Image (cartoon, grey):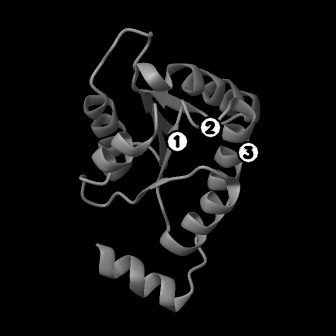
């Protein structure tokens, strides 16, 4: 299961991503927000990060206007490696090299078609398990 959350600036993109995940047969748990009403993104970023950190969800996706605030918030939670990605190459490399477990995107930066490509790449790329990358991820923790 994929945890997903956004603020009002990421609402449209979250809905696109949720629909895409459903089309792929991937279950997701939506932590909100659920409208365009202004909200504080840290509340939603923390909920997604806790769901991933405690094992309730395998991975997470957080979206705000730029993705920056959500990635900062998620990375405050122990065990989370959230990566802000603006293209599929970043998504592939952060999974393969950093074993990132949360994808952050900017709803005001990334369009729907690109976001779907980023999400697919993030979810479909395994961690490399190379010794150097294992060592580096362990150093982060």
Mark 2 burial class by Cα count in 10 Å: few <14, some 14-19, many 20+: some
* Count of labels in the image: 3
Q: Position of residue 81 (x, y in %)?
A: 39, 60
What residue is shown at x 50% (from left), y 67% (from top)? 99
- CB contact under 8 Å: marks 2 and 1: yes
Q: Of marks 2 and 1, which one's residue comes earlier in the chain?
A: 1
Q: Position of residue 94 (x, y in %)?
A: 55, 65
Real-space Cα separation, disc 2 to disc 1, in angstroms: 7 Å
- Of the numbered discs in the image, which one, if any, rests on residue 105? 1
Mark 1 burial class by Cα count in 10 Å: few <14, some 14-19, many 20+: many
- Of the numbered discs in the image, which one, if any, rests on residue 117? 3
Q: Nearer the viewer, residue 58 or 82?
A: 82
- Asked whether, in this view, residue 73 is left or right of residue 103, the answer is left
- Of the numbered discs in the image, which one, if any, rests on residue 2? none
Q: Nearer the viewer, residue 138 or 112?
A: 112
Location of the C terminus (image quadrant): bottom left
Mark 3 burial class by Cα count in 10 Å: few <14, some 14-19, many 20+: some
Q: Which residue is mark 2?
A: 110
Of helix, strand and loop, which one carries label 3? Answer: helix
What residue is shown at x 42% (from left), y 19% (from top)? 8
Real-space Cα separation, disc 2 to disc 3, in angstroms: 11 Å
What residue is shown at x 43% (from left), y 28% (from top)? 6
Answer yes or no: is residue 55 visible. no
Q: Position of residue 93 (x, y in %)?
A: 61, 68
Q: Of marks 2 and 3, which one's residue comes earlier in the chain?
A: 2
Q: Position of residue 46 (x, y in %)?
A: 28, 39
- CB contact under 8 Å: marks 2 and 3: no
Q: Nearer the viewer, residue 129 or 5?
A: 5
Of helix, strand and loop, which one carries label 1? Answer: strand
Real-space Cα separation, disc 1 to disc 3, in angstroms: 12 Å
What residue is shown at x 34% (from left), y 41% (from top)? 69
């Amino acid at each position: 299961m994929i945890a997903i959350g956004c603020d009002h600036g990421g609402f449209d993109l979250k809905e696109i991503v949720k629909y895409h995940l459903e089309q792929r047969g991937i279950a997701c748990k939506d932590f909100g927000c659920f409208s365009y009403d202004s909200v504080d993104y840290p509340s939603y970023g923390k909920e997604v990060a806790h769901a991933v950190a405690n094992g309730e969800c395998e991975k997470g996706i957080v979206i705000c206007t730029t993705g920056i605030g959500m990635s900062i918030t998620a990375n405050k939670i122990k065990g989370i490696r959230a990566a802000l990605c603006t293209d599929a190459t970043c998504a592939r490399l952060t999974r393969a090299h950093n074993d990132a477990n949360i994808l952050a995107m900017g709803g005001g930066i990334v369009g729907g078609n690109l976001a779907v490509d980023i999400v697919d790449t993030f979810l479909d790329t395994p961690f490399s398990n190379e010794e150097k990358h294992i060592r580096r991820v362990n150093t982060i923790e």
